Image (spheres, coloured by chain):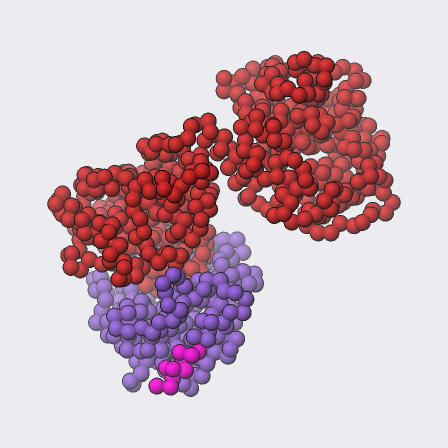
Chain colours: A purple, B red
Amino acid sequence: MADSFAGLPVLDMADEPWHGHFPGLGEIWVTADGSTRVRPELTAASAGDSVEQRRRALTCGWADPLSWHRRGFWLLAAVTASPDPDLGCLVLEASTGGADRVLDRLSERGWRFLADRPTPARVEGEVVVAHPRGTPFLARGQRDQAHEARGDTDAVVVERRRHPAPCVVRGVCSLVREAVGVERQEVLTGRNKVKTAAGLRLGGVFDSRAPSVDPAPAMSPEWLASVVRLSGLPMTTVAVRQKAAGGEDVEADLIEAWWTTVTER
Amino acid sequence: MTESGQAANVVWLASFPKSGNTWIRSILTALSTHQLLFDANLLGSGSQPYAVGSLLDTLGLDPRWLDRADLPRVRDFLIREEASSAVPSGSGHLPRFRKTHEVYRAGSPGAEPFVTSCTRAAVLVVRDPRDVACSYGPFFGVDLAAAVDRMGGASSVSTSSPFKSLTEQPWGTWSSHAESWLSDDVPFPVHRVRYEDLQADAVRTLLPVFEALGLPCTAEQLRDAVERVRFDRMQEWESSHRFREVSPHTPHFFRSGKAGGWRQQLTGSCLADLEADHGAMMTRLGYHLSSGEDVRRKRLETRDSMRRQQREPWWHMPPELGLDVEVGETPAHLPGSESPRPWIEATADQALLRFTGGAGLWVRHGRQVTVRPGSSPEESGDPSWLLHGWAVTLASLQRGGLSLHAATVRVGDQVIAIAGCRGAGKSTTSMALREAGHELLTDDVTLIEFDGRRALTRPYARNVHLMKDAATALGLDFDVLPRLSGGRDKVSFRAEPPSTTPLPLDRIVVLRPDPDATRPELSEVQGRARVRALTQHTSRDGVAEVVLGPGRYFEQLTRLAASVPISILRRPPREWTMPEVVALVEDLCALSPAVTEAAGR
């Protein structure tokens, strides 16, 4: 980690518990067993930013992901959801413009969500299992001033129906930007699956169990093994229009059709 | 190494979009990659610094939970983090190239967009903006005219977004982008590379730059790398691969890399607009222009006017006027009102005006304004004249103030109101004075308030309305400027925004077209004639007496007449005598030595 520099954030993993400090926001502590503590800064860092908003940001955005990691979970840069949790769930990589709209459509159709990104997951027995996080879901837009994540941001907290229990991962769907020459839907094979898995599996601080004084290798054997495991899942891409015509649900239709295909195997 | 142990190894590959950044990065990647392993999708440089999503990997912190004030600090931190993994080379470290399209700016300690302590240098890649425009349009999915407008209008992906983990990323205009990186304020060396020089001889252009940057490379190695990423080879590669940096609007990234290709695509108004916007910087960077300086200057003036007008919707009024404006229906009549003209109904605190084409205006209590444009602005032209003139005048009267039908200009340290009837040449005279180097404060409506015995005026930003012959004489493009709505044969021009603090009014000049005048002549107005000289230009079609009441109106009028010198400027009505008019006004103000100095003579 970088040496501490006045005004810059820092995460110290050399001692127990892990200690993070973000000037203007606050501090976190995460123990080896995953328990957490946060201390938001009490002075107003920006207009309209409350202490409670800062506490929530520290807990949901920083302490919680590290806690899952310290408890031995992978962190996937994706949302997880399912129309029928008894059959499993989908990992939805949804960071492109317009993805919020697609997630809203799925939610309206009764899909239930385990977690906003990052999603905790691990191998249990023979399967990859995603676990629910109780943290709020974020979306983009000024939907309602009262639900802004912070005082000066374009991220708002939204409600989505939740599934509160772990769920077997049946497949991965990456929402990509619609472009000339890009298929509306493409089922991935071979090297493209490995590339997708590598993009999903968060590394860096999420790639080492124990704190180390020496710089960690760029990718640990454990991280590589998780990528190999993830790339064994069925994968597809669905191209998303950044702004769709009113009521257009093509992307949600494609995802649901693919879910049917995957769960019928 | 810096004192904190960081290596100053970052080299910013800075360029306005579509200027050759990918070409340089291709050469750099080819230098460090075996030819059998080269793949355009492996292009190095790292992600652009505005994207801070990697904070999640680096600190475990999801940047979507941050706010806009936090993001610059995150960017600074991530740049330092990446720079800290320096690779030794000889007596130093290998340069670490990072691409950016942003203008250079310094930021603040701990939140620097381009962290000085980590930066070794920058390479600024520039390309003829005419070729840039031809590439910019297809890449961003816009036509040539829109590309030219964006390149000159400072439109850029500027707003920061915590949800998308993006800091602000201002590109500026093509000119201001280059200007920022070439400024003496940049605290590290900047090596300027022209795309056209790369095309002519890439090895000769880049070898000294790479040497200065500490990148070990022989001429032979560089020649080999340049050859491997030759444009036709990149096109061939792209024919069987999808380049990850391709635009969503085009199937191919490597379309045409020729220098000077603009000659086949860019003509007419697009070419003229582009050279007007960027002529100065193009000359500085060694690009030859196809148009003359005077032509470019006037065209730039028209374009700057259009850009100022496009910053806000037509119904937007300067906040210092304190007006609440809505677009909507106006009532058919005002009960209990007087009607000084058939199209005006007014009481002490409300006024209703009806105009040709169905336009209407309803102003009440000095603050609330409802405007009905009559038909859509797209169909009938710019309706802002309804607000800039009459709404402001009526609101001012309802608040107890006076409104002079005059333009206001600052000549040296003298504030002059140029009054006159419709068609007397107020706007033309004020624009001609602006052309002569003086400051245009307001057109057509001079708001008057009193501070003891002193008359003050409060300027506000609004459009100037010009007829065709005036616009043409002033060198402006009548056919390009927005036409006023309601069939009015005038166009809108927006000058530089004035200072909005109240200013003492020093003099009133009343323009009076006189068929008996053979040349412009000035005369002072004395005694009771001063009140008569101003009545016509303060009455506002009789509304002032209705709103203020005859007593208060007369009191204000005499107060104004007593507080400032008044001159009549007679001029022949049909001839263009503007240079003489300007000279007369300047001479009038020459009592103050500051005039000459301010006009830059």
Q: Picture coordinates of residue B175 (x, y %)?
A: 40, 38
Q: Picture coordinates of residue B470 (x, y %)?
A: 60, 27
Q: Is residue A30 left or right of residue B203?
A: right
The residue located at (22%, 58%) in the rendering is B39
Q: Is residue B575 left or right of residue B224?
A: right
The answer to whether residue A200 is visible is: yes
The answer to whether residue A3 is visible is: no
The residue located at (51%, 57%) in the rendering is A151
In the image, residue A111 above or below residue B358: below
- Magenta stretch holds residue A257: yes
In the image, residue B137 above or below residue B392: below
For residue B59, which quarter of the picture? bottom left
Give the extent of the magenta segment. A256-265
The residue located at (47%, 71%) in the rendering is A250
For residue A2, which quarter of the picture? bottom left
Q: Is residue A189 left or right of residue B425?
A: left
Q: Residue furthest right?
A: B336
Q: Picture coordinates of residue A167 (x, y %)?
A: 39, 82
In the image, residue B167 above or below residue A136: above
The residue located at (25%, 73%) in the rendering is A190
Q: Picture coordinates of residue B100 (x, y %)?
A: 34, 48
The prevailing secondary structure element of the residues shown in magenta is: helix
- Magenta stretch holds residue B442: no
Numbered disc total: 0
Q: Residue furthest front?
A: B264
Q: Viewer-proximal residue, B579 or A134? A: B579
Q: Viewer-proximal residue, A154 or A83? A: A83
For residue A144, which quarter of the picture? bottom right
